[in-house]
Structure formats: C-alpha cells, structure tokens
Amino acid sequence: MGFEKFLFYVFALITLWAAGMVITRKNPVHSVLFLVLAFVSSAALWLLLEAEFLGIVLVLVYVGAVMVLFLFVIMMLDIDIATLRAGFIRYLPIGILITAVMAVEIFLIVGPSNFGLEAFPAPEPAAADASNAADLGRVLYTLYLYPVEIAAVILLVAIVAAIRLTLRRRPETKFVDPSRQVRVKKGPRRIRLVKMAAEVAVPAAVSSAQPGVEENS
Amino acid sequence: MIDNYLPILIFILVGILVGVGPLVIGYLLGPRRPDSEKDSPYECGFEAFETARLKFDVRYYLVAILFIVFDLEIAFLFPWALVLQELGIYAFWAMVVFLGILVVGFIYEWKKGALEWE
C-alpha cells in the first residue's frame, strides 16, 4: 500500500505540473504536448484506481487521436499570441473575481465533508485475474445496451457533421488516381499508334540555334 | 490486479532512462561554445525565408476527426470481444446494430469522397 500511495503522489504531481504548464506556455504546441503528458499521467492514476480499461482507452483515444486533432487544429489556426495576451493586466481583476467565485462554489459543493474514508470506504482490492474490461462489457451490452446504440448514432452524427463542415473539393489540384493507375493494361487501349508521313530533314544551317527555340519557330 | 502493471511501470522507467540519459550525459559532458552565428536559424545554409509555422490544410482535421470516430468504435469493441462468449447471440446482434449504424456513416464518407486525398 505504501508504494501505491507513493506512485499516486508521483503521478498526481506530474498531472498537476503538466496541467499548470498547459495554461502558462506561450507556444500552444507546447501546451498540447504538456496536455498529452497530463493525460498519460491521469491514465496512470486511473490504473491505480483499478480502472484499467478506462486508463488504456484514455491513452488510446485521447493521446492517440484527440491530441492529434488538437495539434492539427492549433496548426490550422494562425494564433497570434501577442494579441491574445494584450489587455492581460486590464482583465486580471475580473478574472481573479470569477476564479474566486468558482473556487468557492466548487468548495461548497464538493468540499472536504464529501470526501474521506468515512464517506467512501476503500474498496476491496480486485483479484489478480479480475478483468475490468470484461466487467464493463458485461453491463455495457446488457443493461446499458440502449445508451451504447445511442453512442453509435452520436458517432454517426459526428461523421456526417465533420464531412459537411470541412470537406472541400479542389478540382484544380493535379493528382494521380492510384486505382486507375493500377488498372492500366497493355494493349491497343494504352498506346495509340498513328500513321503519318515521314518528316523532311531540317537543314544543317540552324544547328547553332538552341534546340528548344528551333522547334518553336 | 494492480500488481500486474508493475512490469509496465519498470518498462516506462527504463524507457525514460534510455531516452533522457544520453541527452543529460551529452548536456553535461559535451563542449558548448555558442556564438550568434551558430545559434541563428538557417535553412540548408541560407537565411530563413519565412516562419516555420505554416497553416495546416483543413483536410488534416477531417482525417483526424474520422480517425477519432473509428478509434472510439474500436474502444467499444474491446469489452464486447471479452464477454461475447458469455453473453452469446444477444451481444452479437447488439454489436451488429452498433456497427451497422457506423457503417452507414462509413458509406456516407466513402461516397462523399472524404477518404480521397486529391
């Protein structure tokens, strides 16, 4: 238990530090990379809570996919840090006021009286062969089947919305269609042989001129 | 259960050590004599033409968001695969419906040409 507690504090400190770096870095790309670190250490915290499937999915989905999306979005937007930072001192008092109000609200709702071992006794440690993912699957595909299907519909909406919003046709770009390229067969359809009369030889007098110029004239 | 993850923790620690160790050793032992010419940015020996922060095309965003959707679909498949034997045909058809809804989206994006990179 002592080692687990030590690990919890290590990962909690890494998470807090990385989260702090996310909001203080000047370069938004650095912020995203620190957010990745925060997600990875939160995944470790979830593993310590024996929520192994959630921890792995956090790495798989958030670090593997969502953060890539964040990076693309940040590189897509041309963020000007100087204009974002302008008026920092001017808006500081109202920012501090709102932060204080929110902190007090959070403290009132989820204050220390709601926590502690009296409110939530520590659960029994899971057996060595217990599978968190299988437990999840057992309730997900029986009790919570309807929400799962709703999740599929939400994903469908996400696909359609993303395509409607961002799909752009570029008829002017030149590119090779690989599927047409590999379907090319040898034979009469590929090369067309044209019969034409023999050309008259060019006189040798223009040999000093450049070949390209000669053809154009 | 948590004990099963101890080898992974050791693996991560060794990985960090292997990754960070050479950098630290190089930083401590390597000679550093910087001057303004050495520290100035250049492209293949030339002065930098423009900033390296180019704007990305919106198409990358589309590819990333389509990837996220199907990544999440995979995340739903893992617990299903673990309990399929137990729950039997009921869970099978549940997943067929789930995948069927997403295949509609897949056909849509295929027909729309969102997977083409022209």
Image: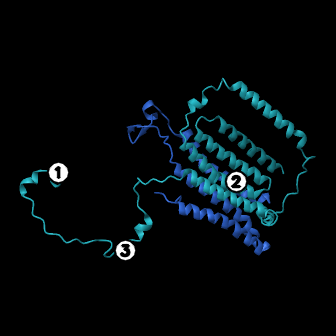
Chain colours: A cyan, B blue
Give the answer, above or below, for where B33 lies relative to B4. above
Is the residue marked by circle 2 packed among few (<14), some (14-19), or many (20+) residues within 10 Å? many
View extreme (right): residue: A118
In terms of image quadrants, where is residue A100?
A: top right
Q: List the residue tagged with mark 1.
A: A213
Which residue is label 3 attached to?
A: A185
Q: Are marks 1 and 2 on the same chain?
A: yes
Q: Secondary structure at mark 3?
A: loop
Horizontal side of residue A87 vs A11, given as left or right: left
Answer few, some or many: residues within 10 Å of disc 1's Cα (few below 14, many 20 plus, some between 14 and 19): few
Determine if residue A174 is in view. yes
- Tell me how far mark 1 sits from mark 2, CA to CA: 65 Å
The amino acid beneath tag 3 is Lys
Q: Position of residue A121 (x, y in %)?
A: 91, 50
Q: Is disc 1 on the same chain as disc 3?
A: yes
Q: As rendered, which of A187 and B46 lies closer to the eye?
A: A187
